[in-house]
Amino acid sequence: MNKNISRFISSVAVAAMVIPMAACGSSSEAPAASSSAANGATAAASQAAGSEGSVLNIQAWNEEFKSRMEDHYPGYQKVDDTTGKIGDVTVKWTITPSDDNAYQNNLDAVLPGNADASPDDKVDIFLMEADYALKYVNSDVTMNLADLGITDADLSDQFDYTKDIVKDENGNIKGSSWQACSAGLIYNRQAAKDILGTDDPEAVQEAVKDWDTFMATAEKAKAAGYKMTSTVNDTYRVYSNNVSAPWVQDGKVVVDPNLKAWVDNSKEMVDAGETTTAELWSDDWSKGFFPDGKVFCYFGPAWLINFSMHADEDGSIANQGGWGLVVGPQSFYWGGTWIAAATGTDNPTLVKDIILTMTTDKDVLKDIAVKDSDCVNSKTVLNDLASDESFGNAILGGQNPYAQLEAGAEKVDMSNISSYDQGCNEEFQSAMKNYFDGNASYDDALAQFNTAIVEKYPDLTTE
């Protein structure tokens, strides 16, 4: 997941209190992990115990993947909070939070010398986020999945964007994810009735089908006593996921027209009192999760709906089943975790099996979707769930979101990502806040951004 989510990932631990995707309709559980996955795990652990390493070291920034392994990887046995067993192999977890870039700093310290590390200290698996994946993908610290024996056919049911994010400059795939974090516009059903006269998803989508229509609806929302969004930052990822070119072109940082459109539309909405400049995850941002917050919509994926909108709190809109989901002006995604094999691993057979089992086995992925409410990285599984009338999200008033999430994942295009995205996106939003708040002109805010970027990335120039 995105680093901004790290403080919320503990919500997964209380997911039992959150009404899951499968809450409406059938009470049956998903099938247990497939026999092929169980057999593969057993065989991999057996080989690892014989000819490979006796310790499997995994580097992560939070507990999410560890909980998925504990709950879904066949044969995994939890020993304590930092240790597990797969057959005779000891699994050691090193969790380094992302705050102040600590997780990446740790990877940068241990991965370059991994091939020469002692067997029990070798990193075997590490996790990556999209915002900085290319930093590791375009280096020799990460193995090609093909070198593990993982083929294109093995990954054929995954969404293309999840593979594009972890392709190196030569087209080699160097990571795999169990998640497809396609996202949409999450709307307050009561607000929709007050503003549009209906909370029907088709009618709401028509009212937010593109940015011009979205802006017109924002005026209606204000007239009805609502903010259109809680903050300008709610829409940023929608715009940034739909740029026409990378942030950096021939060593120069270029502001894409779609990002300039975000600036122009956001400034107009702030000046009109239709949104604010609150920070994501702040108390002001989350006020709209409750009826008195008077916010029409948020933008986000399944994890935001299930784990971040206070569904377990009496009086919240989510607790009352008062949200709905539509595509919104543009398809986008937010979040996701990629599993990478570290160069120098002495457990390639077990690493291969973990990646294949956790990111391609359809029974395991369905189990994750049902029990953990993850939108999983399988076209087949999402299609099956979309056509299953027993599936609905109680937070969404019983709406089944899987058809939309599957369609959205198909449309996500990440061909314009670059290794500079995290820094550029963070500094751009920070600089533009001064403009939105009336403390600087656009040109002054842009100059602030340019200065910050050159300081962060001295190898770049600006327009």
Image (cartoon, rainbow, N blue to C red):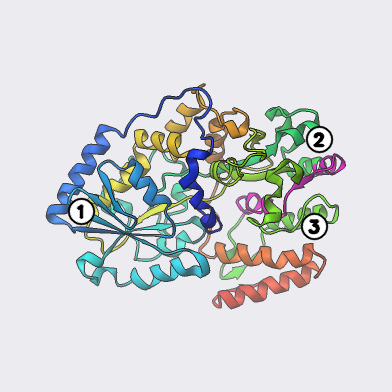
Q: Quadrant of the C terminus?
A: bottom right
Residue 463 in sight: no
**Label 1's element?**
strand
**Label 2's element?**
helix
Classify 10 Å Cα crowding around label 3: few (below 14), some (14-19), many (20 and above).
many
Callouts 1 and 3 close, C-beta under 8 Å: no
Residue appearing at x 45%, y 65% in the figure: 135
**Label 3's element?**
helix
Q: State the separation of the CA atoms marked 1 and 3.
A: 56 Å
Type of amino acid under label 3: Lys
Q: Is residue 377 left or right of residue 5?
A: left
Q: What span is colored magenta in the figure?
A: 218-244
Q: Is residue 344 above or below residue 153?
A: below
Q: Quadrant of residue 459?
A: bottom right
Q: State the separation of the CA atoms marked 2 and 1.
A: 58 Å
Q: Is residue 155 left or right of residue 50?
A: right
* Farthest-out residue, front: 314
Q: Nearer the viewer, residue 82 or 339?
A: 82
Callouts 2 and 1 close, C-beta under 8 Å: no
Residue 267 in sight: yes
Q: Is residue 247 above or below residue 65?
A: below
Which one is closest to the eye, mark 3 or mark 2?
A: 2
Q: Is residue 219 magenta?
A: yes
Callouts 3 and 2 close, C-beta under 8 Å: no
Q: Which mark is residue 195?
A: 2
Residue 297 in the image, given as x and y percentages of width and height: 71, 42
Q: Which residue is mark 1?
A: 89
Q: Is residue 152 left or right of residue 179?
A: left
Residue appearing at x 56%, y 58% in the figure: 4
Residue 440 in the image, given as x and y percentages of width and height: 80, 70
Q: Which tag, 3 or 2, sits closer to the chain's start?
A: 2
Q: Which mark is residue 267?
A: 3
